[in-house]
Image: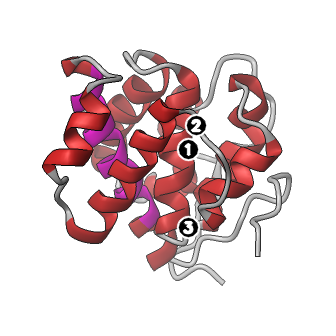
């Protein structure tokens, strides 16, 4: 049971409009529980939406790299809610194989060097909030300055989302993939 229940329909007009902005155009399903939860604080939700949407739709990272970052950060943060949403909605779309997706949780698989560097960086950030010079060099050999900054902000953003979803005990979306055990 969530500690804070996501809002449920019928929504007041201003909440319905705010939730519509969170969801992609043409989607007919109910807005995500996370979005309905955040609408308890509309000002915070509107500020968060801008950054979240920008990271998902307007980033410099390849979509596959973006989803590896999101999946690994959510896995490291033990956040099944957000991991399963992205696994269901984006993984196949961006070419993240089932084995790779599983490996974002287990840490095991053979990745190309650019993704090895990315995963190493995410693991270090999670463990220490720092990157070693060696990891920075490896990552920067595959990424430009904009991408490096985006990785750091994206990882932090999904760490924040994981904090929220985990702290309120947000239940997985009923249509979402299963989280690996």
Q: Give whichever of 141, 169 is nearer the camera.
A: 141
Q: Which residues are magenta?
A: 147-162
Give the residue at x 55% y 63%. Answer: 75
Q: Which residue is mark 1?
A: 12
The answer to the question of whether label 1 and label 2 lie on touching residues, with beta carbons closer than 8 A, is yes
Secondary structure of residue under mark 2: helix
Q: Position of residue 172 (x, y in %)?
A: 71, 65
On screen, residue 96 versus residue 121, left or right, reads right
Could you classify mark 1 by the number of other residues whose Cα lies within 10 Å: few (under 14), some (14-19), or many (20 or more)? few
Nearer to the camera, 40 or 116: 116
**For the point 35% across and 58% down, which residue is it?**
160
Q: Which mark is residue 16?
A: 2
Q: Residue furthest right?
A: 175
Residue under the image location 62 percent in, 47 percent down: 11
Of tags 2 and 3, the one toward the viewer is: 3
Looking at the rendered structure, the number of numbered marks drawn on it comes to: 3
Could you tell me how far apart the alpha carbons at marks 1 and 2 are, in whole angstroms?
6 Å
- Indicate yes or no whether the magenta region holds residue 148: yes
Q: Nearer the viewer, residue 181 or 24?
A: 181
Residue 177 x/y as whole percent: 82, 54
Q: Is residue 10 visible?
A: no
Q: Disc 2 versus disc 3: distance between alpha carbons?
A: 27 Å
Q: CA distance from mark 3 to mark 1?
A: 30 Å
Is 96 left, or right, of 39 in this rendering?
Answer: right
Can you identify the residue that label 3 sits on? 79
Q: In the drawing, does residue 178 fall left or right of residue 18?
A: right
Dominant SS type (magenta): helix
């Amino acid at each position: 049971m969530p500690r804070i229940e996501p809002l449920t329909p019928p929504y007041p007009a201003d909440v319905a409009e705010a939730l519509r902005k969170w969801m992609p155009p043409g989607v007919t399903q109910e807005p995500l529980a996370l979005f309905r939860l955040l609408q308890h604080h509309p000002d915070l939700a509107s500020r968060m939406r801008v950054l979240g949407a920008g990271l998902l739709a307007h980033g410099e990272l390849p979509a596959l790299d973006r989803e590896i970052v999101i999946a690994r950060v959510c896995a490291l943060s033990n956040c099944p809610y957000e991991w399963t949403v992205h696994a269901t909605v984006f993984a196949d779309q961006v070419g993240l194989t089932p084995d790779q997706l599983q490996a974002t949780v287990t840490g095991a698989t053979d990745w190309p060097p650019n993704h090895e560097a990315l995963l190493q960086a995410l693991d270090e950030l999670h463990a220490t909030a720092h990157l070693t010079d060696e990891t920075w060099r490896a990552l920067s050999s595959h990424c430009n300055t904009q991408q490096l900054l985006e990785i750091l902000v994206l990882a932090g953003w999904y760490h924040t989302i994981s904090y929220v979803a985990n702290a309120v005990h947000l239940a997985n979306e009923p249509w979402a993939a299963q989280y690996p055990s």
